[in-house]
Amino acid sequence: MTTKVNYSNQLLNIETGQQIEKSQLTIFDRQGKINKRVINIVNTSIDELLKNIEQGGESYHIYFPQEIEKELPEPLMKQISKEITANEVRVLTAIVILAQFAKSKGELYYWDKINRAYFEVDLPSVYKVMGIGETRGKQRELVKKAFFSLNDKKFLIVEDDNLTISKLVEIHKIDKKNPNLFKITVEGLFFNFDKSKNYQNRYFHIPSDINKQIRKVTIGRPNAGVELFIKCLYQAKHCSKDGKVEYSYSKVYKLMKLENLVKNRNTGRIKDTIQKAFDIAKKLDLISNVEMGETNLREKKYILTFTP
């Protein structure tokens, strides 16, 4: 039987750019506009990054939620931001899994004051969790590149009333004797450390070999939006009471970040990309059926039935 691990709802929201909602008065005012406190945090982070670029300082990118991203000029976004890639999505999943393995062995250390956890990761373990064989040199290089790319990305993190912009994964040291061994810290939201905070609603379950399963059934190049949607389905299945989930077309569009296809003038691929996600979910034995319907506002929706 496949081992299950916890995956943070908050982390998935960050990956899909859905970590803020119009109902959050700590972020939006009553007119639905981003409030000044959040604008100041965003502007400060952008100014700091632009100053670093100008002075040749630390190089990184900021991955903003969709609600903030659409308020920023496109030329600025191209300069300071980068989309999350499929390999980065897979590496994040691998880190979550390996961190929980490390925690079970007493090899993960949590610092409450900064809400970060420290542990050591060796790349061969990452490859193994991702289902990459020893002979797949090119794929290993892509994974290693994605690991370092995550180290160069900052994300907006919302925790209760607090907003911060920081790295989800940070590499602090690479072992000189073993260059495949990384000493890293990760944001505390990856894990469950405080059972007093309604923790059961903060996590859902994924198979520990999810990357391997997805790699096995995926035809063609990996797609970040598709793989994020697969995680969303595991989340929905965990919460479903009737064995089904319904998504409006606009919700699927947001979760899979299909706006990127429009930006790249690949609008014709939207339908095929959505279908690819459904096909992979069926091959994973995650869903058994997809039906079409309409919402109350007459928008197209998808009704997905989960496999028992």
Image (cartoon, helix red, strand yellow):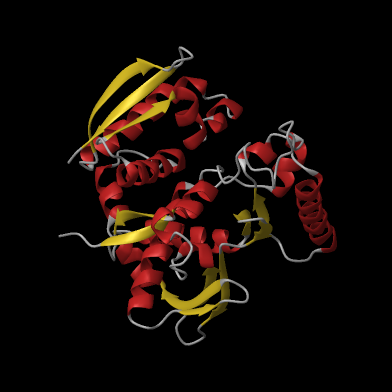
Q: Report the residue at 57% width, 46% height from top.
A: 19
Q: How far across and how far down the image is residue 256, in percent?
A: 47, 35
Task: In this rendered view, identify the residue nearer to me: 193 or 136.
Answer: 193
Quarter of the rendering occupied by the N terminus: bottom left
Q: Report the residue at 67% width, 47% height from top.
A: 81
Q: Report the residue at 45% width, 47% height from top.
A: 86
Q: Quadrant of residue 69?
A: top right
Q: Compared with residue 146, is residue 177 higher up or lower down, i.e. above or below? A: below
Residue 25 appears anywhere in the view: yes
Task: In this rendered view, identify the residue nearer to me: 6 or 284.
Answer: 6
Q: How far across and how far down the image is residue 28, in percent?
A: 71, 40
Residue 180 appears anywhere in the view: no
Quarter of the rendering occupied by the C terminus: top left
Q: Report the residue at 51% width, 21% height from top.
A: 267
Q: How far across and how far down the image is residue 96, in percent?
A: 41, 63
Using residue 1 as the reference point, say whether residue 81 is left or right of it. Answer: right
Q: Quadrant of residue 107?
A: bottom left
Pick out the residue farthest to the top.
298
Using residue 159 as the reference point, say whether residue 194 is left or right of it. Answer: left
Using residue 104 as the reference point, say whether residue 248 is left or right of it. Answer: right
Q: How far across and how far down the image is residue 194, in percent?
A: 47, 69
Using residue 50 as the reference point, say whether residue 272 is left or right of it. Answer: left
Pick out the residue farthest to the bottom.
177
Counting every numbered tag in the picture gives 0
Pick out the residue farthest to the left.
1
